[in-house]
Image (cartoon, rainbow, N blue to C red):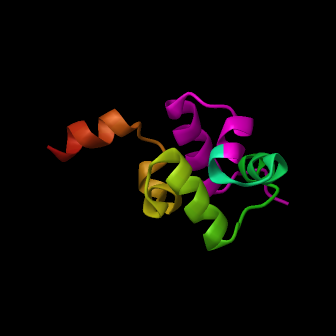
């Protein structure tokens, strides 16, 4: 089994930390169980349902594409904006 986390896991954790909220706070904002967030971020659930991803995206105030897109996974939001202009 690979130890590499999914792009979704990396992006959720990145955007959650940028928002300054805990996994517990995110789970409440997204109306999901805490263990759902924890398992996704840990890589135990590498392919969450689109409904789950949509709830997380809404809670983090990002698009579903932001959570799925690997090219954005390694860049902070400020860096993407600066490079786009």
Instruction: Give how far across and how far down residue 13 sits, in percent.
Output: 62, 41
Quadrant (top left/top right/bottom left/bottom right) for the N terminus = bottom right
Residue 43 placement, left or right of 21: right
Instruction: Give how far across and how far down residue 62 sits, in percent.
Output: 44, 51
Q: Residue at 66% of width from left, 57% of height from top?
A: 6
Q: Residue 76's image quarter?
A: top left
Front residue of 44/4: it is 44
Q: Is residue 73 above or below residue 76?
A: below
Residue 80 placement, left or right of 47: left
Q: Residue furthest top?
A: 20
Residue 35 placement, left or right of 12: right
Q: Residue furthest left?
A: 85
Front residue of 79/17: it is 17
Q: Residue at 69% of width from left, 54% of height from top?
A: 31
Magenta residues: mostly which secondary structure? helix
Instruction: Give how far across and how far down residue 11 sits, in percent.
Output: 55, 48
Query: For the image shown, how many numbered marks are present on the structure?
Result: 0
Q: Is residue 8 magenta?
A: yes
Q: Residue furthest bottom?
A: 50
Quadrant (top left/top right/bottom left/bottom right) for the C terminus = top left
Q: Is residue 3 magenta?
A: yes
Q: Is residue 71 above or below residue 23?
A: below
Magenta-highlighted residues: 1-28
Q: Residue at 70% of width from left, 67% of height from top?
A: 47
Q: Residue at 30% of width from left, 42% of height from top?
A: 80
């Amino acid at each position: 089994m690979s130890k590499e986390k999914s792009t979704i896991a990396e992006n959720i954790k990145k955007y959650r930390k940028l928002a300054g909220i805990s996994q517990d706070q995110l789970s409440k904002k997204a109306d999901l169980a805490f263990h759902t967030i924890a398992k996704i971020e840990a890589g135990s659930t590498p392919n969450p349902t689109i409904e789950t991803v949509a709830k997380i995206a809404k809670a983090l105030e990002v698009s579903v594409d932001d959570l799925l897109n690997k090219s954005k996974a390694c860049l902070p939001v400020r860096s993407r904006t600066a490079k786009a202009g």
